[in-house]
Each structure stands twice: as structure tokens, then as C-alpha cells.
Amino acid sequence: MSATGLSQPPLAFVDLRRQQETIRRRIDSAIARVLDHGQYILGPEVQGLEVQLAAFCGIRHAITCGSGTDALLMALMAQGLQPGQAVVVPSFTFAATAEVVCLLGGIPVFADVQKATFNLDADSLKMALLTARHLGLAVAGVISVDLFGQPCLYDTIVPVIEENKLWLICDAAQSFGASYRGRPVGHFGAMTATSFFPAKPLGCYGDGGAVLTDDSSLAGVLRSLRVHGSTRFKRRCCSKNWRFSKARSQPESAQPAGMTPSCRKRSGAPYAATEQPASGPNTRSLSPRATR
Ligand SMILES: Cc1ncc(COP(=O)(O)O)c(C=O)c1O
């Protein structure tokens, strides 16, 4: 009998040790390579990872940073969220989605999620916008969340967002590598934030994250925000150090090219024991049931 009173030790939700065994030698040699060349800050491995991430998603820019939460914060800052402005977020998500709005002095307004997908519901989004206006709040944008690996039904929420002239930031911490109607995550909002927390679809051995965008001017702002809001010779605003650490960025420990097979595994046997993912009109290339 174990300390938990169970006859068997609990089944690891995501067995990172087993995953690591298959790539351990590559990780060790990649870390040795970084120690040998000594370019520890935003060097060739980070640049290489950003190129791979962007290519994997078919998008122009991937800007890595310290975590998925940092990615959301940087995206909100790049979008220019002002204190007192409201942002609609789903009521069912990880705390970070709403927390970042508060950290910048914004006001999160909660909209409900769909029963079938746990993702933002278009009718609830409309109601949240009406309620916010009724309360005299100026709504600036929406953060959608693709929970449990399933992209939102973007066909239903994007028209509401466009009609109301709002921006959309997508929180893809749990859905990197998924697609909706044949388009990979990364293409649905002005910016998409993702996380490399170890148990995420694209995990690394530590904390990490990235913002994906097709917009070159937003990419420039994000790169500057990542390094104290500075360009080479100028500071454009107050920010902080949000850089992604080199050893964690080894392609072996965060590897988009090798990601799809491991994501596919997630929708396989271990998940079959849980309730089946809800079906809907959207195409989903992977359906892990939970990733935290
Ligand atoms: C939906 C969602 N958003 C944001 C985050 C924050 O990511 P991180 O832990 O890398 O800061 C998470 C992490 O669990 C998440 O699940």
C-alpha cells in the first residue's frame, strides 16, 4: 500500500520521465553545445526555435518569452491596453487569462463557455458586451481560450468581435499544434499566446512561452517589450526582461518539428479512458483532455 492509501502509485497525468528517456542523449548534447559556445541570451538556439515555431504554424513571427502568462501580458501591452479598459475573457479558463488584464489595470468581463466545448460562447460574448456597455465600461478586446486542445468555434465568435470593432488575442496555451477548419492555431487573432509549461502540447523542461503574429509591426513591439521596452538605442516604454532561457529552448526540449506525433499520442490511449472530446463542426487535429 502506498502513502496515498492506493495499492498502485497514481498514474502520471503526463509521463514526462518516459518521454525524456527517448530524447535524453539529444538533450544532454544540446545543453553541452550551449555551454560550449557560451551565447546564453537569445542566441542561435532561441532564434532557431522561433523560426521553427513560425514555420510550423505557417505564420511570420514567433517571439519567445518566459512563460505563457508573459506571452499574454506582452500581447496585451503590444495591443496597448489602457488602465480602466475592459477585456472580455471566458469564465472557465486558467487564472492567467484574466489575471493579466488586472495586472495592467484593465477590467476582465466574463462571458460563459459552451457546454459542449468549454470554449467561449458567441451568444454569451454578445451578452457580456451588452452588460459591459450597460455598466459604462469601454471594451477594448477579447481574449479567447482554446481549452483542452480544442480551438474555439472561431466562425461564431470572430464576426461578433469584428462587428464591435474589437481586437482578438488568442490564448493557445493548451492548443499549440491544433487546427480549426484546416488552419493551424496562430491564425485567428492579431496575436496568439502559447505556453511551453512541461505538460502542455509543446512543453519544455522549465517555463517558457511565445507570441505568434503575422503583423510585423506588432512583432517589433513584442521583441522590444521582451527586452525592457527597448530597441537597440532607445527605450520606448517601461517593460521588463521576458526572455526565454537558452537551455530550455533546445530544439530537443521544445521541438515543433517533433511535436505533431507526440500531440497525436495525446489523443490516443491514455485519453480514451476519459470522456470523449465533444464533437462539433470544427476540425481538430488533436484533442488532449487537459494539459496543465
Ligand atoms: C489557458 C491557459 N492560459 C495561460 C496559461 C499560463 O501559462 P504559463 O503557466 O506558461 O504561464 C495556462 C497554463 O496552464 C493555461 O492553461
Image (cartoon, rainbow, N blue to C red):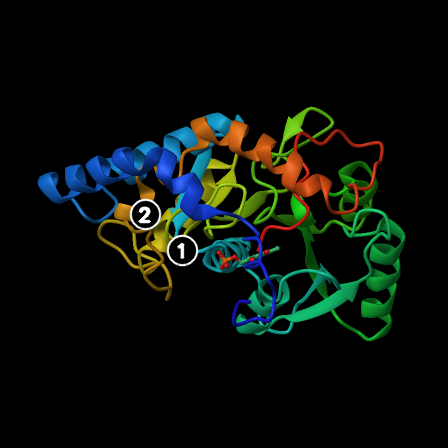
Residue 248 marker: 2
- Tell me if label 1 and label 2 are in contact, CB under 8 Å: yes
Residue drawn at x 77%, y 41% as measured from the top left: 277
Q: Nearer the viewer, residue 3 or 158?
A: 3
Is disc 2 surrounded by few (<14), some (14 to 19) or many (20+) residues within 10 Å? many
Look at the numbered disc 1 and give the secondary structure of its residue. loop
Residue drawn at x 83%, y 41% as measured from the top left: 156
Q: CA distance from mark 1 to mark 2?
A: 8 Å
Can the viewer see residue 146?
A: no
Q: Nearer the viewer, residue 161 or 44?
A: 44
Whether 278 is drawn above or below 120: the answer is above
Upstream in the sequence, badge 1 or badge 2?
1
Residue drawn at x 32%, y 47% as measured from the top left: 248
Amino acid type of the residue tagged 2 in the rendering: Arg
Would residue 282 appear left or right of 49 to someone viewing this image?
A: right
The quadrant the N terminus occupies is: bottom right
Label total for image? 2
Is disc 1 surrounded by few (<14), some (14 to 19) or many (20+) residues within 10 Å? some
Look at the numbered disc 2 and give the secondary structure of its residue. helix
* Residue occupied by mark 1: 207
Q: Nearer the viewer, residue 202 or 157?
A: 202
Disc 1 residue lies near ligand 1 with CB under 8 A = yes
